[in-house]
Amino acid sequence: MNNIILCGFMGCGKSSVGRKLSQRCGREFVDMDRYIEEKTGMTVAEIFEQKGEEGFREIETEACKELSEKENLIIAAGGGTLTFERNVEILRQGGKIIFIDVSYENLCERLSHDTRRPLLQVENRNEVIRQLLDKRLPLYKKAASVYVNGNFNSTVVVNNILTIIR
């Protein structure tokens, strides 16, 4: 299998990089959160509200299985997807995992006005970002076979990914 799976913290640019990368490579782009929303008929926020995080994670693992069976995809994994070893194992079977690494400061800036992500709809947003990033960063690094600096605009990140994978 030859899918390219983009992983990283929310706000790192997985979706914008993924869309541009798919255009440059002539591959289909799949944003995993949008895929789950289309499949369930609910937004991620609604799934969290109705089924809790555990219910969402079960649906997410099923999405990993379905997508890993397809070929030539550019997949933007959800921010928490690859923090679960079962999802890492599933997605590795289908392709190469690339970690888009962005600094804490840039993530705080990029996510400062976010209203979509359930985990960030709190008063102490930057503290939540710090805690989640501290927890997730080692897991992203463990999951990925390639790291790319995501502190640049998406075009630069795409060019760097293309250089790495060619």
Image (cartoon, helix red, strand yellow):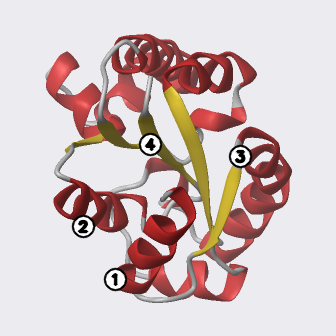
Residue 93, placed above or below residue 106:
above
Q: How many residues crowd around disc 3 within 10 Å: few (fewer than 14), some, or many (20 or more)? A: few
* Of the image marks 4 and 1, the number of the one nearer the N terminus: 4
Q: How many residues crowd around disc 4 within 10 Å: few (fewer than 14), some, or many (20 or more)? A: many
Is disc 1 placed on a helix, strand or loop? helix
Is disc 4 placed on a helix, strand or loop? strand
* Of the image marks 2 and 1, the number of the one nearer the N terminus: 2
Q: Mark 2 points at which residue?
A: 20
Q: Which residue is drawn at 57% across and 64% down?
A: 164
Q: Is residue 62 left or right of residue 132?
A: left
Residue 31, placed above or below residue 81:
below
Q: Name the residue under label 1.
A: 155
Instruction: Please report contact status of discs 2 and 1: CB closer than 8 Å, yes or no.
Output: yes
Q: Residue at x 35, y 21 (%)?
A: 67
Separation (CA) of disc 3 from disc 2: 21 Å
Separation (CA) of disc 4 from disc 1: 17 Å
Q: Mark 4 points at which residue?
A: 4
